[in-house]
Image: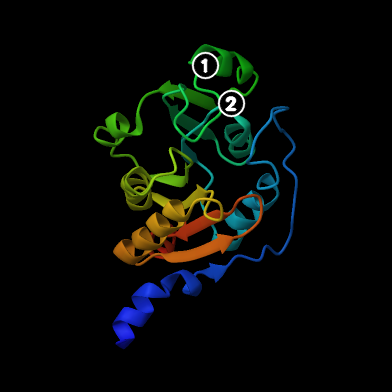
Amino acid sequence: MGLRTYIREHFLEDIRPYKPASLTQPAQLLDAVSAWKGLEMIIGDIITRFGIGREKCIEFGVEFGYSAVVFSNFFERVTGVDTFEGDIHTNNKQEHFQQTRERLKPYGNIHLVKSDYRDWIVRDNQRYNFAHVDIVHNYKETYECGLWAARHSECVVFHDTESFPEVRKAVKDIARATGQQLFNYPHHYGLGILVDTKSIAKRK
């Protein structure tokens, strides 16, 4: 086996583990069932560690709104994009846009959009400080949405890097394609963290 082949096949082992300097619970949390619970404790640490701006956050995969509320603690505006109809990997497959919008009404800086990510990314050319990708956990969709997010934000986090190998593979490949720094937090089903340090340096 050649060196390049070895590196390619073992790239998964080269993801740097993310070790937060501190764990802090945000002031506002949504009382809802979520596989995301626990990850709210490291978001402030990620933002501080990499010097990420706090103006705009975009989230692909809102579901019931738990993570959107977490992000609302840290960013002036959070845009949540979702079909609100579930997918093959979710338990709830009923349309729930209105229910989620009502649930998140108290959080005035969250703006929800009922849209497939594919329709959104072809028309949005904005830059964001932070992005979250937690859509259907297949390689193609995660890669396509995640690559757009990596090219339009300072930092992208991907849920379920530990529980879905296809998500982890997509995140690795996005890191390769963009040359951005890749970390992984292994707890609570895993959170891949992709950081565009060049973009952050330019902003500063």
Quadrant that contains the C terminus: bottom left
| In the image, residue 200 above or below residue 78 | below
Q: Which numbered disc flags the more N-terminal residue, 1 or 2? A: 2
CB under 8 Å between discs 1 and 2 = yes
Residue at screen point 61% across, 50% down? 189
Q: Nearer the viewer, residue 197 or 62?
A: 62
Q: Is residue 88 rendered to the left or right of residue 21?
A: left
Based on the displayed image, in which of its 4 quarters is residue 199 positioned?
bottom left
Gap in angstroms between the C-alphas marked 1 and 2: 8 Å
Which residue in the protein does label 2 denote? 64
Q: Is residue 41 above or below residue 176?
A: above
Q: Residue at x 75, y 37 (%)?
A: 27
Q: Amino acid at mark 1?
A: His
Q: At which x and y percent is residue 50? A: 54, 61
Figure quadrant of the N terminus: bottom left
Helix, strand or loop at label 2? It is loop
Q: Is residue 143 above or below residue 56?
A: below
Residue marked by disc 1: 96
Give x and y (percent) for residue 41. Answer: 70, 49
- Are there few (<14), some (14-19), or many (20+) residues within 10 Å of tag 2? many
- The disc at residue 36 is none
Element at badge 1? loop
Residue visible at 54% across and 27% down in the picture:
110
Position of residue 161 measured from the top left corner of the image (x, y, whole percent): 52, 54
Tell me the crowding category of disc 1: few under 14, some 14 to 19, or many 20 or more residues within 10 angstroms, Cα based.
some
Q: Position of residue 111 (x, y in %)?
A: 49, 24
Q: Nearer the viewer, residue 179 or 14?
A: 14
Disc 2 residue type (three-letter): Phe
Closer-to-camera residue (175/35): 35
